[in-house]
Image (cartoon, grey):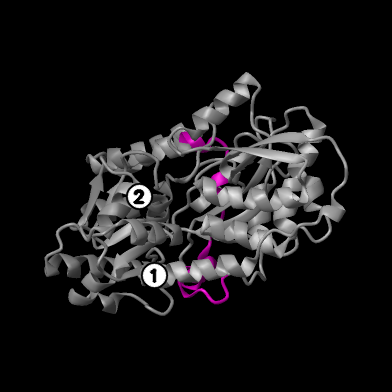
């Protein structure tokens, strides 16, 4: 639920303070030649904020003054173009901070990433990392192209005040944050009767936030998005056909070809929509801090499902190293990763900076944080991490084109068949849920 901004920021400040500063260890520093590393980071929480990243690098340089790290801050709008351009030009960065969609399924498959298996085999370094996270970081060729830092489960959210006034709270399980497909339909109808014309929108103006629409469609009747082996896209199934037909026919749910996930989240925070399908802890922080029109209580929810067992899509973020042919730089980059992962202080600060959750079990980073614990409960609903399936970029583009087709009245089964055909083309790359 929505928390007081002051209390929220106080809690985050206390967490950062509890993680402590850098641990100077000059006596451990060996004399060696200075090395220049480049780190390119996508805007995961405050990893897109220069002041936050500078604090982490200051800690690092207290222990390793001979390794100098310059940082380039990417956006999700043009970051892929910048990285791919650098790869083609032979000027790829040494380190990159992102997720398996890019590091493993795309750049790893293209043979430009360094194998990090030695880090995974370093005693204690990978202890506690969740099995599904480990699997996502390992390529089918056996190499590990990512070392994970943090993760989340994407969810949806409802306007709790509006649901209460419309008498729709009876249709949700507030304790477990779940509801059935039938309850979802009943809630939408109750909100319409209350006078809320637009209850929710299936945004499809682009790939931004498409993790929400995929989870909505596949959860409603238990449909699949890929095969179990993550080698092909299998969205053309009766369960997804039924789900899309329901969404198109349900008064109060509109298809919006002019909106992406960020637009939907903003409209929800403005009170224009009763629910948002693109949501997570980081989005609530952003909207709470930056949206002056947010005057209602937010309740994060799992997506409705007829089985009673929601499967939420996860997000994983971590470090990869481009194989630029310089062994000294690769070793220095691994030193940076070890520094972040080995120290409980630095690991905590790095995770908190991302406004996500630890990628390993047993961490107490958010032990006393009510807000993050509320979102942490959704980890138990995390489903299969299918975003590493080949041709992810093709699939993301094909998905929102399919939704536009359905929204424009196209035959649903044919639209899904076209999606599968396009997504399974062999000339695609990879994209990121953003």
Residue 412 picture quarter: top left
Quadrant location of the C terminus? Answer: top left
Membership of 308 in magenta stretch: no
Instruction: Identify the residue at the far top of this view.
Output: 89
Q: Which labelled disc corresponds to residue 6?
A: 1
Magenta extent: 366-394
In the rendering, at what x and y percent does residue 415 appear?
34, 38
Left or right: residue 14 compared with residue 67: left
**Residue 68 visible to an observer of this rendering:** yes
How many numbered marks, from 0 up? 2
Does the CB distance between marks 2 and 1 fall below 8 Å? no
Q: Which labelled disc corresponds to residue 315?
A: none
**Residue 221 visible to an observer of this rendering:** no
In the rendering, at what x and y percent does residue 104 appear?
64, 41
Left or right: residue 345 compared with residue 191: right
Query: Could you say whether the residue bearing mark 1 is in a helix, strand or loop?
Result: helix
In the rendering, at what x and y percent does residue 145 appear?
69, 42
Disc 1 crowd, CA 10 A, few/some/many (<14, 14-19, 20+): few
Give me the residue at 67% from left, 45% from top.
146
Q: Which residue is mark 2?
A: 241
Q: Nearer the viewer, residue 264 or 385?
A: 264
Q: Nearer the viewer, residue 394 or 163?
A: 163
Residue 328 picture quarter: top right
Disc 2 crowd, CA 10 A, few/some/many (<14, 14-19, 20+): many
Give me the residue at 74% from left, 36% from top.
114
Query: Could you say whether the residue bearing mark 2 is in a helix, strand or loop?
Result: helix
Q: CA distance from mark 2 to mark 1?
A: 45 Å
């Amino acid at each position: 639920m929505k928390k007081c901004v002051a209390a929220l920021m106080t809690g985050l400040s206390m967490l950062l303070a509890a993680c402590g500063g850098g641990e100077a260890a000059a006596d451990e520093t060996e004399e060696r030649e200075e090395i220049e590393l480049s780190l390119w980071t996508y805007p995961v929480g405050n990893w897109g904020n220069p002041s936050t990243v500078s604090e982490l690098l200051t800690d690092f340089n207290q222990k390793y003054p001979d390794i100098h790290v310059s940082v380039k801050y990417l956006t999700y709008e043009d970051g892929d173009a910048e990285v791919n351009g650098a790869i083609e030009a032979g000027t790829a960065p040494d380190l990159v901070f992102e997720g398996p969609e890019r590091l493993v399924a795309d750049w790893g498959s293209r043979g430009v990433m360094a194998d990090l298996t030695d880090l995974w085999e370093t005693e204690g370094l990978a202890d506690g990392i969740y099995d599904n996270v480990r699997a996502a970081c390992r390529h089918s060729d056996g190499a590990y192209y990512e070392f994970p830092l943090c993760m989340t489960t994407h969810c949806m959210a409802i306007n709790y005040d509006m649901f209460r006034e419309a008498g729709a709270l009876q249709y949700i399980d507030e304790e477990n944050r779940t509801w059935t497909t039938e309850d979802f339909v009943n809630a939408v109808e109750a909100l319409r009767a209350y006078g809320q014309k637009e209850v929710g929108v299936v945004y499809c103006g682009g790939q931004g936030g498409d993790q929400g629409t995929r989870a909505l469609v596949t959860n409603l009747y238990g449909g699949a998005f890929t095969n179990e082996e993550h080698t092909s896209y299998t969205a053309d199934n009766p369960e997804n056909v039924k789900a899309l037909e329901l969404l198109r026919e349900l008064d109060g749910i509109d298809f919006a070809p002019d909106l992406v996930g960020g637009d939907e989240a903003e409209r929800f925070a403005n009170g224009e929509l009763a629910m948002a399908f693109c949501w997570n802890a980081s989005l609530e922080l952003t909207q709470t801090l930056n949206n002056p029109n947010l005057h209602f209580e937010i309740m994060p929810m799992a997506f409705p499902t007829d089985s009673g067992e929601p499967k939420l899509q996860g997000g994983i973020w971590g470090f990869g190293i481009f194989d630029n042919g310089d062994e000294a730089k690769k070793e220095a980059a691994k030193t940076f990763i070890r520094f972040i992962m080995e120290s409980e202080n630095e690991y905590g600060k790095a995770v908190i900076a991302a406004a996500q959750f630890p990628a390993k079990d047993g961490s107490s980073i958010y032990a006393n944080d009510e807000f993050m614990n509320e979102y942490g409960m959704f980890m138990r609903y995390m489903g299969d991490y299918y975003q590493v399936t080949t041709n992810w970029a093709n699939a993301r583009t094909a998905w929102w084109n399919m939704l536009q087709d359905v929204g424009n009245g196209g035959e649903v089964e044919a639209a899904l068949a076209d999606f599968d055909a396009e997504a399974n083309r062999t000339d695609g790359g990879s994209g990121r849920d953003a």
